[in-house]
Image: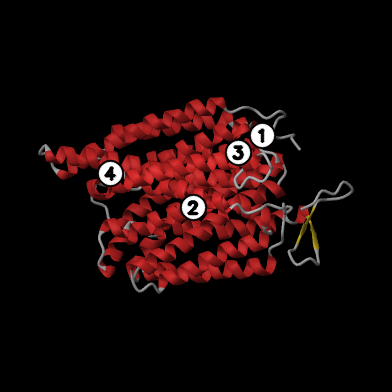
Amino acid sequence: MTDNPTGPAVASDGRGDSRVPEERTPWSVIGLMLGAAFVVILNETTMAVALPSLMHELNISAQTAQWVSTGFMLAMAVVIPTTGFLLNRFTTRQIFLAAMGLFSLGTLMAGFAPGFAPLLIARLVQGSGTAIMMPLLMTTILQLVPVHRRGQVMGFVSIVMSMAPAMGPTVSGLILQVASWRWIFFVMLPIAVTMLLVGAWRLVDVGERRPQRLDPLSVVLSGLGFGGLVFALNKVGDPAGTTVLVTSLGVGAVSLVLFVLRQLALQRVDQPFLDLRTFKHHNFTVGIGLLMIGFLSLMGVALVFPIYLQDVRGLNTMTTGLLLLPGGLAMGLLGPLIGRLFDRFGARVLVVPAASTMTLMIFTLTWVTSTSTPIVVLIGIHVVLSLSLSFMFTPTFTAALNDLNPKLYSHGSALVGTLQQVGGAAGSALLITVMAQRAAGLERAGIGRVEALLHGTHATFTLAGFIAMGAILLGLLLRKPATPPAVRV
C-alpha cells in the first residue's frame, strides 16, 4: 500500500498488473485471512483429547505423546520472532501462501505418519505455518484499517483466538467417536488446501516492502532463546528432566540476553531483526504484560479445569469438551461488540473491570469446586470467566498495537505472538506442576486420589488468582491516546 495524497490508498494484487482501491480491499483480504487463521488455530487444541489413542496405537507413553502439543508450541516460539523480518521482506501473498503451504504439508504428513517421530516432525511443520499466519493477520489489519475502526475489526480476531481453541477438543472428540486420530488431519486437509488455493487466486498485496537484511546470528539466538525457554517451561515438574530443564533454561536465558544485545547493535544501523524500540511505547509495553498474564491464567485454567471435570467429576472427554464450548463461543461471538466499545471508550474502561472479573472468577473456582458442585454452576463460572478474558484481550491487543508507528507494526505483531506463547507455556507448566505436586504430596500422606487431586486443583486456582491480580494493576496503567479513539485518523 502506498500513500496517495490525491486519492485513496491502493494495494497491489501481487502480480504487478492491477491496483485495488483500499476501501474495497479490507474485507476481501482480512476475511480470507480470518478464515485461514481459524483453521490453523483450531489445530492447536485438536490433539489434546487424542493422546490416549496415540498412546495405544503408537505404543508410546503419555509423556512422549504430549510432545505432539509441546512440539507445536515450540515451533511457534521459534518461528514467530522471524515474522518481523518476513513481513518486511516479502509480499502478503508470498507469506500467506508459505504459511498455508507449510500448514497443509504438515497436515498431510501427519495424516499418513507411520510412527511417532514422523508425526512430531509433521506437527513442527504445522506449527511453523501457524506461527506465520497470526502476525500476518494482525499486521495486515494495522495496515488496512484506520485507527478509529481497528477495535471492531480486532474483535473478529478474538473470534479466531478464542472460538477456534475452544472448538478444537469438541471437533476432535466428535471425529474420534467414529474414526481414528488420523482423520483429525484428513478432515482438516481439504479445508486448508481450499484456503491455500483461494488465497493464490484472490489475495492482494498490502503494505510496502522494506529492504531488510537477514541476520543469521539473530535467527539462531532467537531460536535458542525463545525455543529453549518454552522447552524448559514444559519440563517443569518432571523429576527425570531436571538436568534438561536447567540446561535448557540456561541456554535460553543466555541466548535471549545475547539476542537483545544483538538487536540493540543492529538498531544503531536501523536494521534490527526484531525491533525492540516497540518497548519505548507505553501502551505496547503495558499491553504485553497484560497479555502474558492473561494467557498464563487462561492456559493454566484451561488445562486444569478439564482435569478436574474428568478425574474428579468422572466426565468423559466428549462431555468435557461440550461443557467448555459455551464459554469459548461466548468469548468469540462478543468480540466485534467489544471492539466497537473499544473504538468508542478506549481500553482502560474495559480492561480494568474485565481483569477484576477474571480474578474473581478464578478465585470463585477455588471456593466452589467440589465433588458435588452442580455442573450448571461450573458452566456459568466458565462462561463469565471467558467473557472477562474477551473484554480484556481485544482492547489490550488493539491498544498495544495502535500505540506503534507503522514502521513497527510487523515487529510489534511478532513480539505479541512470541511473548503470548511464552506466557501460555509458563502458565501451563507452572499451574499443572502446582496441581500435580500438591496432589502427590497429599496422596503420600494417605489421602485418596480424588480428594488429593481436588486439593491440588484448589491450590492451582488460588495461585492463578493471585497472578491474575497483576492484570488489574497493569490495566490501571493503560493510557488514553492523545485524541479519543473515535476521532483519531
Residue 479 at x, y percent in the picture: 62, 27
**What whole-number distance in Å separates the C-alpha atoms at marks 4 and 1?**
45 Å
**What whole-number distance in Å separates the C-alpha atoms at marks 3 and 2?**
20 Å
**What whole-number distance in Å separates the C-alpha atoms at marks 2 and 1?**
37 Å
Residue 7 at x, y percent in the picture: 87, 50
- Please rate how many residues cluster around mark 4, counting C-alpha atoms within 10 Å: few if below 14, some from 14 to 19, many from 20: some
Which of the marked residues, 3 or 2, is nearer the chain's N terminus? Answer: 2
Q: State which mark lies toward you, 4 or 2.
A: 2
- Which residue type does callout 2 highlight? Val
- Please rate how many residues cluster around mark 1, counting C-alpha atoms within 10 Å: few if below 14, some from 14 to 19, many from 20: some
* Image-quadrant location for residue 47: bottom left
Give the residue drawn at x 33%, y 35%: 461
Residue underneath mark 1: 344
- Which residue type does callout 4 highlight? Gly
Give the residue drawn at x 76%, y 38%: 489
Q: Secondary structure at mark 2?
A: helix
Residue underneath mark 2: 78
In-image side of 118 versus 84 (left or right): left
Compared to 321, does 236 lie above or below? above
Between 274 and 310, the one lying in front of the other is 274
Which of the marked residues, 4 or 1, is nearer the chain's N terminus? Answer: 4
Task: Find residue 264 and name its label.
Answer: 3
Residue underneath mark 4: 237
